[in-house]
Amino acid sequence: MRIEGILSKWNNDRGFGFIAPMQGGQEIFVHISAFPKQGKCPQIGEKLTFEIEITGEGKKRARSLVRIDFPEPKMLKFSRQPKKRSSLGCVVLPIFILGLIATGYVKYFQRVNPQIAIAPQELVSTTTSPFRCDGRTHCSQMTSCAEATFFLKNCPNTQMDGNNDGVPCERQWCTNL
């Protein structure tokens, strides 16, 4: 049986209060959990309808509250008819997604299989010189000052100029410069 009442006391910090029944009698305990989940916080003086239940200790408390002053929000009704998509969206979206996939594919394989970059010095024609870049980088691998100088000027990652003065292998091959 539903009873009408007014919220007479409310403790917001502790989440409970008391309802004074309209037909009179003792106030009924109410916990915040008895209020509907949506809506405003309970307000002293608001009209309610509720049912009474007896707790395990034999005390009365309100349950299944309905707020009379605050109607419950109406549920939105969803149409079962699908929305029409624009033809532009049907074309642009798949192209955009394919573009993202292609970009990711290319970037992934660039990281997984990096190709060895060819240094610009290696592309220089060596027809005028008897030397060619073959991966040697140290003075101990050279046979002359001219060869060491060619490698220093034309080949990448050489380690033949310790003092960075442009003269390679000063202790071994290029001692008179």
Image: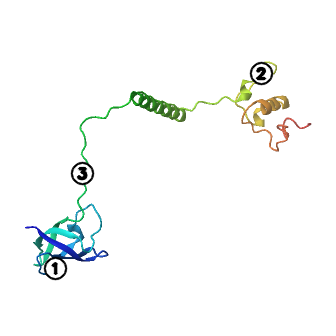
Residue type marked 3:
Met
Mark 3 to mark 2: distance in Å?
82 Å
Mark 2 is surrounded, within 10 Å at the Cα level, by few (under 14), some (14 to 19) or many (20 or more) other residues, namely few
Q: Which residue is mark 2?
A: 126
- Residue at the spot x=24%, y=63% of the render? 70
**Circle 3 or circle 2, nearest the eye:** 3
Residue type marked 2:
Thr
Q: Quadrant of residue 115?
A: top right
Residue 59 at x, y percent in the picture: 12, 78
Local secondary structure at mark 1 = loop
- Residue at the spot x=80%, y=21% of the render? 130
Which one is earlier in the sequence, the residue at label 2 or at label 1? Answer: 1
Q: Which residue is mark 1?
A: 27
Q: Quadrant of the C terminus?
A: top right
Residue 47 at x, y percent in the picture: 20, 70
Q: Quadrant of residue 42?
A: bottom left
Which one is earlier in the sequence, the residue at label 3 or at label 2? Answer: 3
Residue 65 at x, y percent in the picture: 18, 66
Residue 37 at x, y percent in the picture: 25, 62
Mark 1 is surrounded, within 10 Å at the Cα level, by few (under 14), some (14 to 19) or many (20 or more) other residues, namely some
Residue type marked 1:
Glu
Front position in the image: 32 or 128: 32
Q: How many marks?
A: 3
